[in-house]
Structure formats: structure tokens, C-alpha cells
Amino acid sequence: MTDRPMVPSEVVLVDEHVDPDFHAAVLALGDTWTAPSGRQYRIVLSGSVLVVSWPSGEHLVPVPPGEQVDEDLLALAQAIYRARGGEWAEVDLERLAEVWSGATRPELHDAAS
Amino acid sequence: MIEELPAEVSAAFPFSPHWVDAGGFRLHYVDEGPSSHDVVLLLHGNPTWSFLYRKIIPIIAAEGYRVIAPDFLGCGRSDHGFSEEQYQITHHIRRTLSLLDAVGAERAVMFCQDWGGPIGMGCALARPGLLCGLGLGNTFWGEGSAFHHRVFPWRALHGPVVGPLFFNRRSVFVDGARLGMPVAVARDPVVQRAYRLPLDVHGSFLAALAWPRAISLGPDHPTQPLADAIWDALVRWDVPVRFVWGGADPVFPWEEQGLQLARRLPRGMEVEPVVIPEGRHFIQEFAPDAVAAAMLALAREGFS
């Protein structure tokens, strides 16, 4: 037994509106995607709705910390962008998040921080 | 809905809350000044709420005008939807019209910033006779700007998986909004708390994610018919116009967006636009006095 919370639901993330331009890229990843962490996720695209969930039978696995799941999801998004190709393949999502954090406006950050 | 604001946010936003039922949702709005069928309507965009007008509302109300500042669905103190579908722009327009009906507004001068533009101008389209004056700041009519067409740093932000991740789980977008604000405002913890409120209280910010996806990038986009209708209507709106524009906004540069709107509106070039060189996207945070002055001028002209 573990005192950590159990996965209450299989669903990890729902994206309701996947642009048709990305459908082939999502489908190219297959039904199950393995993150660099080794964790596996089930991927179902139905119409424009993408559901990312834990694979069946994994429901008794302890919930990983949110940051680890976020890292996996970031890697999944990156994989979709790479599969989409072209300009999208080159997007570094970590750098994108950094830009939006205000890295391009250093005056927003206190000198002490 | 958020019935009680945190004390520090309430101190910076000391307006009594008002609520309206619109399409099954409870929406919050500010209603200040004397009762009147003529209203000064202040419309926010993404990812803000009526808090954006906290310094502007008292100035206009003190001059004897009724000010209405709504929080769109999923924003500020209003209810949240549970599906992106509910955040379509036409639904925002319908709910805003319901609010205007509920407060008895018959004529309005409106200030539109960001998505406030397509929503406010969409209301004017749907309700002939409503619009008596148009104030515009860092906004558009529904068609994406050059910025919106770029994969980096815009379209990649709200693509598959990364959209829900950055707009909800990681709050990259709502925190990044401070890029469009003055440094002192962006660093203010009360302001940060206020703009993060919908996300912190509800745990998600679907409204903020739905908006970028609603920007039309081409003729087949669902928002394009609305954008076309607004663009066509602009030449017919013979009302006083004022521009208060942030000149350092990469999203809506003055020459690309503001000037086009000014040239399209019959009276768009009548008054010199106020372009704040250092002003960025959230012009209300850079130049609240200028926005208030523009709206007072519009109210005096438009309601006379």
C-alpha cells in the first residue's frame, strides 16, 4: 500500500479543439505514447477532441507529481509539433514558455530575483 | 462566479458587484454612476476582466455618466463555461446584449480593447441604434494580425496539448500578460493576484484558451463571417470615434490595425489619435486618464 493518492480518473488532459491541420500528426503517434520519462499515455483523437489518459490497468499506479506530468505533456506537445513538421518542428516549447515568462523584458524582474 | 474578492483585490477594485443571468450563466458587471439608458460601456479582452478599468470607471462616473463594465464568461468574477464551444464570439456577443437589455441600455459609447473590439462591434452590428460613439485601443475586428499568423511566439502557444497545458496547468499565458503592462503594474502583487483570480479560483481558464483559437487566420475560419460583417459595417458607423493606442504593442501595431480602422470609419480621422509610444497591449494600464478623457468626450458628443 502507499499513502500517496491514487489516480481518480484515467483522463490526464482534454484538448477540445485540435485544428484539423494537426490530426495527421496526432494520429501518427499511435494509440499509446511513451514519454521520455518512461510513463505511457493513451491518446485518442475523436473528431477535434483529443483525450490523453492513463492506459487501462494503470489506475492503481500512484499519481505522479503534477510537475512530472506537465513535463510529459510538454514532451507530447513537442512530439506532435515535430510530427506536424515544417515551421512547427522547430518550436522549442521550453523556450516559448520562457519568452512568455517575461524573459524578453528583463526589466520586469526584480534585480534581487 | 466569485462572490467575494480577496481583501487586497477588493481594496483596489471598490465597486459593488452586479449580476445578470445570461444564457444560463451568471455574469458579473460593474454598474457605477447615475441610472440612465445611456451607458459608457467598457469592454475588456484576453485574459483580463473589468479590473482593467478600475482607474477609469470612477473618473467617468464622477462626470455624471453611467458606466457598465462586464466580465465576459469565464473571466473575472463571472461563471465559467465547461466547453470551448460556449466561448464562441457570437455567444459572447449574445450574452453581452442580454446584459445590455437587463440594465436597460438603449444607447452606448463603448471602449473596446483586444477581444472587446469584435464583441463590442458585434453588439453594434446586432443592435442598430445602440452605438453612439466608438473608443478603440489595441484591438481588431476578428481577423488575425501579422503577429497572430506567426507560429513563434503565438500559434505554438495554443496548439494541441500545449494550449491546455500553458493556459491552464502552467498558467504561462495569464502570467505572460504582464508583458503587455507597465513595469510597476506588472510587478504589483495585487494586480498579479487580480488577473490570476479566475485561474486560481476555478483551476482552469478555458476562456483564455478559446479566444486565441477564435482569431480568424483565413476565409474558412468560423470567426471570419463576423470579421467580414464588422469590416463591412465600419463604413456605415457615422459616430464620433477616439483612439487611445499603445504604440509598442507587437500584437496590434498602430499602423497595421489602428490606422486601418481609423481610415475605414467615416469619422475615424476626425480627431488626432492618442498613440502612447511606450504603451503596450493593455493600454488601460498605461494611460487610464487618456482613456477616460476619450470616453467622456465621446459621451458628450454621442449622447447630445
Image (cartoon, coloured by chain):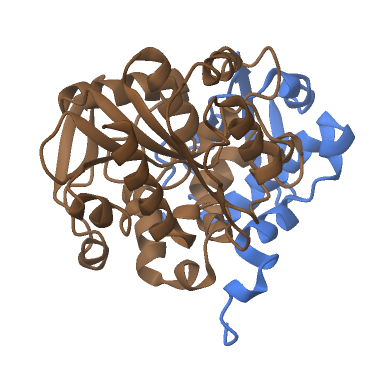
Chain colours: A blue, B brown
The residue sitting at 66% across, 73% down in the picture is A106
Q: Is residue A76 visible?
A: no
Q: Which of the pair B69/B235 is nearer the observer?
A: B235
Q: Is residue B204 visible?
A: yes
Please tell me in which quadrant of the rendered image residue B81 appears. Answer: top left
Q: Quadrant of the C terminus of chain A?
A: bottom right
> Residue B287, how many percent across, how many down?
46, 60
Q: Is residue B295 above or below residue A80?
A: below
Judged from this view, the residue extending furthest toward the right is A86
Q: Is residue B101 above or below residue B3?
A: above
Q: Quadrant of the N terminus of chain A?
A: bottom left
Q: Which of the pair B54/A32 is nearer the observer?
A: B54
> Residue B139, how many percent across, how many down?
54, 38
> Residue B156, how many percent across, how many down?
71, 40
In the image, taking residue A50 as reference, residue B94 lies left or right, namely left
The residue sitting at 21% across, 26% down in the picture is B105
Q: Which of the pair B99/A72 is nearer the observer?
A: B99
Number of marks in picture: 0
In the image, taking residue A34 as reference, residue A112 lies left or right, namely left
In the image, taking residue A37 as reference, residue B173 lies left or right, namely left
Judged from this view, the residue extending furthest toward the bottom is A112
The residue sitting at 59% across, 50% down in the picture is A70
The residue sitting at 62% across, 75% down in the picture is A107
